[in-house]
Amino acid sequence: MEHHRPSRTYLEQLRKRYAKAGRTARRRMLDEFVQTTGYQRKYAIALLRGKRQWRAPQQPIRRPRQRIYTAEDQRAVRQLAAWFDQIGSKRLRAALDAELPRLRRRGHLRVSATGYKHLQRISPASMDRLRQHDPQRAIRPHGGTKPGTLLKSQIPVRTFAQWDDKRPGFMELDLVQHDGGNASGFFACTLTMTDVSTGWTELRAVQTKAQVFVFDAIQFIRRQLPVQLLGIDSDNGGEFINDQLRRYCETEHITFTRGRVGRKNDNAYVEQKNWSVTRKLLGYDRYDTVAQVARMNRIYALYGVYINHFLPVMKLTGKERVGARVRRIFDAPRTPYQRLLDAQGLTPTEARRLRAQHDDLDVVTLHQQITTLLEQLVPSRRK
C-alpha cells in the first residue's frame, strides 16, 4: 500500500480534533492516520499529542554526475566512428584497442594527452551517448533471385557432418542485385563470399547474374583468398546451381552444398553481409554498365581489405531463454584478420605475408580512397 506523509496544516487540524475526541473516536482516527502515513503507532500517538515536532519530508539528495568526457572527446569519437564505417560502439571499442596507437603515431588522431587517455578507456556505453545524435542513413529492403532447378538433386543440402565451421576455408556465397528497384533488363550484381569461421569477406561485381560471370567471379575470389578454399555453400539460385560450378568443385575437391529452399537462415553468415557490407556501401541504386562494374570492383578491392583488416565482427556463440525473451550471446569483437591468425589456418609463410600486409595498411588512407571512388560512381537512371 502506498503511504503519504501529512502536511503541517493537516497535522495541526488533526491534533485539535484528536484532543477533543473520545476514546473510541481517537482509536478510529489513530488507525486511519497510521494506515495512511505508514508511521509506527507509538510515533503517531506522540505526533498527535504534540510530544513530537512535525518535520517536512526530506527529498533525496541528487548530486549531478561529474562530466568526464569533453567536447574534444566527442569530436574524436565521431571522427573515429567515421573512419571505421560507423560500426557499433562495441565493435568500435575493439577496433580502437588495436588501431588507436597507430592512428596517433601516424598523425591522423590529433588530440591532447588527456583526450588520448580518455579514448583509451572510454566504454561502448559512453561512446553510444556521445554518438546518439549522429545522423543515420535509412536503407530500404529489396532483392530477389530466381531459384535454380538444374541438378539440384545432385548438390546436397548442407549438413554439419560435411563442414568444419571452425576451420577457415568453408565459405557461404550469395548474390546482391543492383537493379534500383526495377528488375527488368540487365543490371549489375555483387557476389559476396564469407568465411564461416573467421568472417573474412570478399566482394566481386559482375555484369549480370548469368552463370558465366558468377563462375568467373568465384574463381577470381578464390585466387584472392588468404586461405585454401575448402567448401562453398549457396542458396538455390540458378546462378549457383548449375553443372559448370558442380563439375569445377568436384575437379578441385571443393565441397559444394546448398541451403534448404526458402530458408535464408541456412546462409546466415553471408546474408547478414548483404546489408552490413554491400547495401551499406552502395545502397539500392541501379548500376548496369560495364564502366560502373569496373569502378565497383576497384572499390571492392580496397573495401575488402578495409573490412577484413580493420572492422571487428562479433560471432554468435549461443542463445539462452529468459522468460519469453531469447538472449543472444556473442563472443568478443575481433577483426577477420585477427580471427584468421588465431585460427591457425595459415602456413607460417602465409601468416608472415598477411602480417606484413597489415603493417603497411593505413585505415584513414583506405577510408579516404574508398570515399573518393564512391563519389565517382554515378548510378544509372531508374528505368
Image (cartoon, grey):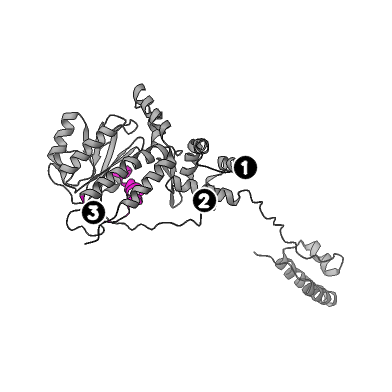
Q: Residues within 10 Å of mark 1 (few under 14, many from 20)?
A: few
Residue 49, horizontal then vertical, whole percent: 85, 69
SS at circle 3: loop
Residue at which label 3 appears: 144
Q: Which mark is residue 128?
A: 2
Residue 80, horizontal then vertical, whole percent: 49, 45
Q: Which SS type dominates the magenta stretch?
A: helix
Residue at which label 1 appears: 114
**Residue type, label 1:** Thr
Is the C-beta separation of discs 3 and 2 under 8 Å? no
Q: Magenta residues?
A: 267-289
Judge from the rendering whether residue 95 lies leftward or rightward of residue 258; answer left or right: right
3 or 2: tag closer to the N-terminus: 2
Judge from the rendering whether residue 327 lies leftward or rightward of residue 243; answer left or right: right
Give residue 202's quadrant in the image. top left
| Figure label count | 3
In the orientation shown, which residue stands out farthest toward the right? 51
Is the C-beta separation of discs 3 and 1 under 8 Å? no
Placement of 332 over or under 59, stated as above or below: above
State whether residue 262 appears in this view: no
Give the foreground label among 3 and 1: 1
